[in-house]
Amino acid sequence: MRRGLALAAVLAALLAAHLAGLTQYLSFEALRDNRLALLGWVAANPALAAGSFVLAYIAAVALSLPGAVWLTLVGGFLFGALLGTALTVLAATAGAVLVFLLARWLLGEGGLGRFGERGARLAEAVRREGFTYLLVLRLVPLFPFFLVNLVPAFVGMRLGTYSLATGLGIVPATAVFSLAGAGLGRAFEGEGGFDLRAVLTPETVLALVGLAALSLLAIPLRRRFAR
């Protein structure tokens, strides 16, 4: 009964977030229109701004709201590439841990084994090489972030292993998007909207190269996971 009520509460929170229109604020237009106020607030209240950003990111990950990548860009824009990366890694890891703990409490550690022999074999493989599997899946986005949060909970992965692999694995992609976000300031300077020459800042170009490298790395990894 407690698990059923908790699951209903989570679903209600997800529905309320979408019905409240929170996702409409996760857009480049909203950031462009409010950028001066946000930058001023961050400059006047750096600690409060950093804490608020972390809490908002944790909520977005825990509730699986669309826009985590956008928030990563915002972190780079508001705090710079280095601090933005650190704050985002902290928040994303904390949000992923919350999802992991909730999924393990609601559905138990043997959830994957219920999908027959193949599910049981996969669960055993993940338990045996859990850190390596999860680190690879975090480094290269082969599957949705939310799905990768859930599967380890269903196979009994240890919380410490899950947290460490998550924290380390999301650093490269987070750094890439934070670097791109740090270059958004010049892209917003034009009053007429986005100018391609303004968008393609050195930071953005370097970020695109990093994403391309991660995408190329995914090709052999997909084949290995298929086997």
Image (cartoon, helix red, strand yellow):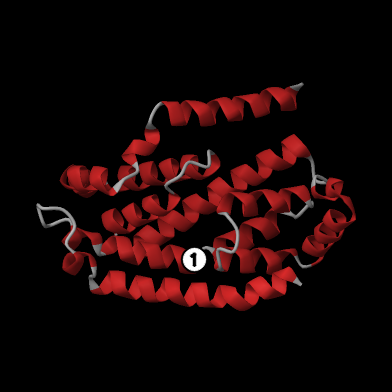
Can I make out residue 81 in this image? no
Measuring 61% from the left and 48% from the top, which residue is drawn there? Answer: 97
Measuring 28% from the left and 71% from the top, which residue is drawn there? Answer: 203
Report x, y in % for residue 12. 56, 25
Measuring 62% from the left and 61% from the top, which residue is drawn there? Answer: 164
**Based on the displayed image, in which of its 4 quarters is residue 120 positioned?**
bottom right
Front one among 22 and 44: 22
Front one among 161 and 151: 151
Report x, y in % for residue 57. 44, 45
Report x, y in % for residue 53. 37, 45
Asked if residue 28 lies left or right of residue 101, the reply is left
Report x, y in % for residue 122. 81, 60
Q: Is residue 70 above or below residue 211?
A: above
Front one among 20 and 47: 20
Amino acid beneath label 1: Val
**Based on the displayed image, in which of its 4 quarters is residue 144 positioned?**
bottom right
Can I make out residue 100 in this image? yes
Asked if residue 169 lies left or right of residue 209, the reply is right
Asked if residue 106 lies left or right of residue 9, the reply is right
Badge 1 marks a residue whose secondary structure is helix
Give the position of the C terminus as an image quadrant: bottom right
Front one among 226 and 10: 226
- Residue highlighted by disc 1: 171
Give the position of the N terminus as an image quadrant: top right
Measuring 22% from the left and 44% from the top, which residue is drawn there? Answer: 38
The single residue placed furthest to the right in the displayed view is 117
